[in-house]
Image (tube, helix red, strand yellow):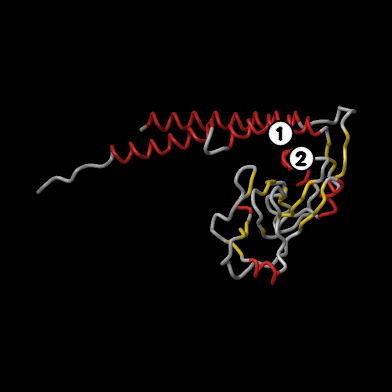
Amino acid sequence: LDSFAELEAELEAELEARRQQYVYYRDRLLDYRDDESVEWAKLSDLYTQFISPIRDRPKVFDGDIPWCRIEDVEGRYMSDSREGLRVSQQVIQEMNLKVYPIGTVLVACSASIGTCVITTQPLVSNQRFVGLVCGERIRNTFLRYYIESQTKKLASISSTGTIAGITRKRLDGLEVPVPPLEEQERIVAILDKFDTLATDISQGLPAEIEARRKQYAYYRDKLLTFKEKVA
């Protein structure tokens, strides 16, 4: 059992090293400050739709449109409510809920500021997020990575209080590099591979760690289960 625990610790250490490596290369790949050939634009010039959800929480969850929170973030994407919270079209209409279309970039503007995901199906969320529907000049995947790389900056310009938050005006003013679409796609392909190795529970090191944990639990239970003596 000690051998299993040591192996898991080694894998965890390697995973942390991979994550740090990912952040390093992400920031290097997205640093265009010295590249005069790359155009820059304010975030407000790069989206066609800014979707801001209402504050009220639905009282009835009997539909098929997921109502999501920060806890429902799954790596680079958001697709469903882990608690099965889903609203109906009737509730959406009655409450005037804002539905994010597929491919919307969701940005957390309070609490976990800078957390950024892409929707893989139509859904609604609580007020922690705002939704950005990208225009033709920028890929949603590239924008997601760039905003993620700017988490510290976004936190630095957020308001202070019980719960820190960033206003639309300040978010809109974020300067974003806009390289050619082909270059954006190249960067995204590289970062996707790094991100999968570091965070995807179904592949890479996270998958191996999960497998080792299950293996450890299996052998622990087998080794520590004793037959009762017959009186």
Q: Left of 177 or right of it: where is 186?
A: left
Q: Residue furthest right?
A: 36
Question: Dot 1, crowdedness within 10 Å: few (<14), some or many (≥20)?
Answer: many
Q: Residue furthest bottom?
A: 94
Nearer to me, 218 or 98? 98
How many discs appear?
2
**Quarter the N terminus occupies:** top left
Q: Residue furthest left?
A: 231
- In the rendered image, residue 220, in percent from the top left (x then y), is placed at 33, 38
Mark 2 → mark 1, Cα distance in angstroms: 9 Å
**In this figure, which residue is indicated by the disc labeled 1?**
188
Which residue is painted at 77% across and 50% down in the image? 133
The quarter holding residue 14 reads top right
Q: Left of 40 or right of it: where is 93?
A: left
Amino acid on which the number 2 mark rests in the picture: Arg
Which mark, residue 38?
none
Amino acid on which the number 1 mark rests in the picture: Val
**In this figure, which residue is indicated by the disc labeled 2?**
139
The quarter holding residue 147 reads top right
- In the rendered image, residue 172, in percent from the top left (x then y), is placed at 84, 49
Question: Dot 2, crowdedness within 10 Å: few (<14), some or many (≥20)?
Answer: many
Which residue is painted at 73% across and 29% down in the image? 186
- In the rendered image, residue 131, in percent from the top left (x then y), is placed at 74, 53
Residues under numbered marks 2 and 1 in contact, where contact means CB atoms less than 8 Å apart:
yes
Dot 1 falls on a residue whose secondary structure is: helix
Dot 2 falls on a residue whose secondary structure is: loop
